Image: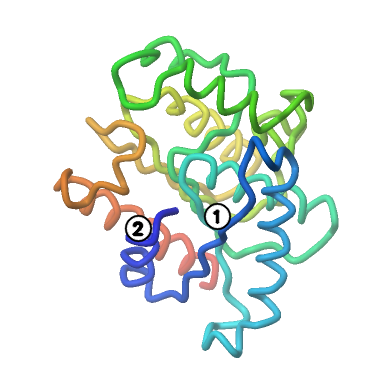
Amino acid sequence: MRDKLCRILANRLGAVVVAVDYRLAPENVYPAALDDVEAAWRWARAEAPALEADGERFAVAGDSSGGNLAAALTLRLRAQGAAQPELQILLYPALDATCSRASYREFAEGYNLSGAQMAWYWDLYRAGAAPDAPELSPIAAAHLSDLPPAVVALAAADVLRDDGRDYAQRLEAAGVPTRVVDCAGMIHGFLRWTGEVPAALVWINAIAVAARELSTSRRV
């Protein structure tokens, strides 16, 4: 996520936010970015006291490709039998490298992120890896049980809309507490445009409220 969005979420959630500058494709292909995110997760947990953060309450979050990495991290930690975050916040996440869902056709052109662009990004990142590998395409995981509660924010007019919507539905079906924030009238990337899109702050506030409510309900 961009620095501005990280700062806003830090303020809205009353949280310490660690933004991860993970390696990018095509110079560094899958799973380099996920490896970096895992390393940052372990570092943040170990360094929580130095960061003046609550060492018992962690969340992972990301927008677009960052949402992919946040979701993939929870799958990797589950496979390792490692401690999970208390919450995952997925903001218009990219979760399916096959680019086959209906929203790819519905919003293929004219909505900031095109279907062709997204397919190109996936090809650069996966570099020959099977598109249905769960740590690449989290929605391809055989099951989604035993994962952290999730807030999933969708942009209504976005090729990635159905990635997030279908993933949220599968999480709910697996018994994972899930809140969907369906951002009407928005396109991909809008959360970063708080200066240009007044509704962006409204939706960020809604995401923060959902995250606080879901986190609180877990501790009751």
Q: Position of residue 62 (x, y in %)?
A: 50, 51
User: Which kind of residue does numbered mark 1 sit on?
Assistant: Gln
Compared across the picture, whether 110 is left or right of 176 comes to left
Residue shown at the point (18%, 45%) measured from the top left: 199
Task: Determine which of the numbered discs, if any, sits on residue 5 in the image.
Answer: 2
Could you say whether the residue bearing mark 2 is in a helix, strand or loop?
A: helix
Q: Position of residue 17 (x, y in %)?
A: 47, 70
Residue shown at the point (68%, 52%) measured from the top left: 74
Task: Determine which of the numbered discs, if any, sits on residue 88 in the image.
Answer: 1
Seen as rendered, the residue at the extreme front is 27
Q: CA distance from mark 1 to mark 2?
A: 16 Å
Seen as rendered, the residue at the extreme right is 80
Above or below, 32 against 124 in this view is below
Residue 134 vs residue 21, the one in the foreground = 21
Q: Position of residue 175 (x, y in %)?
A: 63, 45
Say whether disc 1 or disc 2 marks the residue closer to the N-terminus.
2
Residue shown at the point (30%, 22%) measured from the top left: 111
Compared across the picture, whether 178 is left or right of 4 comes to right
User: To which quarter of the image does residue 87 belong?
Assistant: bottom right
Residue shown at the point (83%, 50%) measured from the top left: 79
Above or below, 137 against 190 in this view is above
Q: Position of residue 216 (x, y in %)?
A: 46, 69
User: To which quarter of the image does residue 180 belong?
Assistant: top left
Could you say whether the residue bearing mark 1 is in a helix, strand or loop?
A: strand
